[in-house]
């Protein structure tokens, strides 16, 4: 079941050249930042993207481990990271995706002479063809 709000502990590894971040409950979810502010931003972004991928794949999201159960070394600290998924999901649904298509050269030449915006034209044509005006 997809939730709108997730909170997971992240393990921040402090080093001279920055901060690396891992999520004990989300295997494969890693990121880093040069300072505290960037690290918090990167942690939220990485966690949201990882959870979005799990949702898309239909994978269950694990229960978060209590921060009191995570052992830290002297150069590590546990930080709770929270993400609010609705705006992130909307952003992911609206992101641009690249499509490769093939048209005859003569048609491409004519379109370029007339300054055709292929992306805009294809979007308009697909919306008309599918009978939609915006995102469903």
Image (cartoon, rainbow, N blue to C red):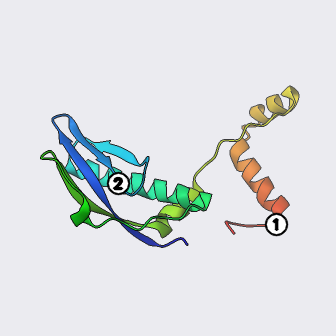
Q: Contact (CB < 8 A) between labels 1 and 2?
A: no
Which numbered tag is attached to residue 24?
Answer: 2
- Nearer the observer: mark 1 or 2; the answer is 2
Q: Residues within 10 Å of mark 1 (few under 14, many from 20)?
A: few
| Residue at 49% from the left image edge and 73% from the top image edge | 3
| Residue 117, visible in the rendered structure | no
Decide which of tag 1 and tag 2 comes sooner along the chain.
2
| Residue at 67% from the left image edge and 66% from the top image edge | 135
| Residue 70 lies in quadrant | bottom left
Q: State left or right for residue 20 relative to residue 58.
A: left
| Quarter of the figure that contains the C terminus | bottom right
| Residue 13 lies in quadrant | top left
34 to 46, vertically: above or below? above
Q: Residues within 10 Å of mark 2 (few under 14, many from 20)?
A: some
Q: CA distance from mark 1 to mark 2?
A: 45 Å
Callout 2: SS: loop
| Residue at 25% from the left image edge and 63% from the top image edge | 69
Query: Residue 45 location, x and y as percent?
Result: 40, 54
| Residue at 80% from the left image edge and 54% from the top image edge | 125
**Residue located farthest toward the left when viewing the structure as drawn:** 74
Q: State left or right for residue 105 relative to residue 117.
A: right
| Quarter of the figure that contains the N terminus | bottom right
């Amino acid at each position: 079941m997809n939730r709108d709000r997730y909170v997971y502990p992240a393990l921040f590894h402090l080093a001279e050249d920055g901060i690396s971040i891992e999520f004990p409950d989300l295997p494969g979810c890693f990121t880093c930042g040069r300072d505290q502010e960037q690290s918090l931003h990167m942690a939220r972004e990485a966690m949201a993207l990882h959870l979005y991928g799990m949702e898309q794949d239909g994978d269950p999201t694990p229960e978060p481990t209590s921060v009191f159960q995570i052992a830290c070394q002297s150069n590590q600290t546990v930080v709770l990271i929270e993400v609010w998924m609705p705006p992130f999901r909307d952003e992911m649904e609206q992101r641009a995706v690249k499509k490769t298509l093939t048209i005859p050269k003569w048609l491409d030449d004519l379109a370029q002479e007339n300054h055709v915006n292929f992306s805009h034209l294809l979007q308009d044509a697909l919306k008309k063809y599918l009978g939609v005006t915006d995102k469903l």
